[in-house]
Image (cartoon, rainbow, N blue to C red):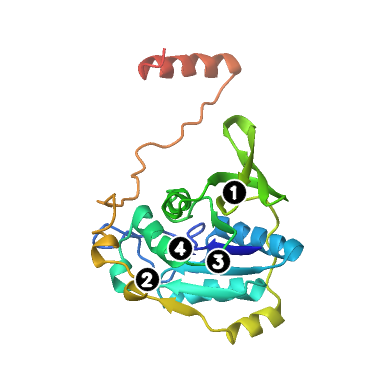
Amino acid sequence: MEIVVCVKHVPDTTETEIAIRADERAIEKRGLVFDINEADNYAIEEALLLKEEFGGSITVLTVGPAEADETLRMCLAKGVDKAVRLTDEVFEGSDSYATARILSEAIRDMDYDLVLTGVQADDDGCAQVGVTLAEMLGIPHAALVVSTEVEDGKMKVHRELEGGLHEVLEIELPALFTIQTGINEPRYASIFGIRKAMRKEIETLDLEALGLAEEAVGEAGSKTSLIKLFIPVVTAQATILEGSPEEVSSELVTIFKNEGVV
């Protein structure tokens, strides 16, 4: 099975004080630790499990600067066969649509049975690149996939719905799935795998190599525009009500009335 996985090199902001850049259109990235996007890590593991069961090869793609090679090499260390970085100054400012366009031109002429992406990126949370990419490639897709099973050239997938429900779909290949976190247990790269990955070549493709026009990428090729980022201002603190149950209940009712809840 020939598999393509799209990943993103993102900053880890879970325990970091975030600062907005001076132009208010991005966060200040200096000093931040970068790693593979969490959901994409699960997509890599799912690809590796399928490769181990059915053979074939895995190609990993990312859109990003040279620093993103760190994420690509970690994928190679885990068992991915080939890594490609799509990079060009004019890609800067691409929204989900323009990013999907860049990826689609890189994937279009590849020999693939399956394309995997994470369900969404940790930095923007848009969850649009995967499904948009499928439409551009003209292949069926399923989002929020939590299990996969190969059956006679097709794949049966469970996708997560609201309220804890699952939808089961049978989809012909080639297809694209956006992978939900928790579908598997991502492995760690071995020391031997890391050393081997450091010697592997990472292919780079720019705007010209992809055959794209400059107006098709970046802000010019985007369908949406980021106007401003800001950190919400804390306007109120929690109030602890003390006293007997009767006193607390009475005070709570008074607060509800004053706030127009009842």
Depth check, mark 2 against mark 1: the one in front is: 2
Q: Which numbered disc covers residue 108? A: 4
- Say which amino acid is labelled 3: Asp
| 112 displayed left or right of 79 | left
Depth check, mark 3 against mark 2: the one in front is: 3
Neighbours of disc 3 within 10 Å: few (<14), some (14-19), many (20+): few
Indicate which disc, 2 or 4, sits on the residue closer to the N terminus: 4
- Say which amino acid is labelled 4: Arg
Indicate which disc, 2 or 1, sits on the residue closer to the N terminus: 1
CA–CA distance between discs 1 and 3?
25 Å
Q: Quadrant of residue 106?
A: bottom left
- Say which amino acid is labelled 2: Leu
CA–CA distance between discs 2 and 1?
29 Å
Q: Is residue 93 above or below residue 30?
A: above
Q: Dot 4 lies on which element? A: loop
Indicate which disc, 1 or 3, sits on the residue closer to the N terminus: 3
Depth check, mark 1 against mark 3: the one in front is: 3
Pointer 1: what residue? 180
Please state the horizontal and vertical placement of residue 191, each as a whole percent of the image. Answer: 70, 80
| 112 displayed left or right of 9 | right
Please state the horizontal and vertical placement of residue 195, each as a whole percent of the image. Answer: 65, 85
Please state the horizontal and vertical placement of residue 25, each as a whole percent of the image. Answer: 28, 57
CA–CA distance between discs 2 and 4?
10 Å
Pointer 3: what residue? 111
Depth check, mark 1 against mark 4: the one in front is: 4
Q: Quadrant of residue 41?
A: bottom right
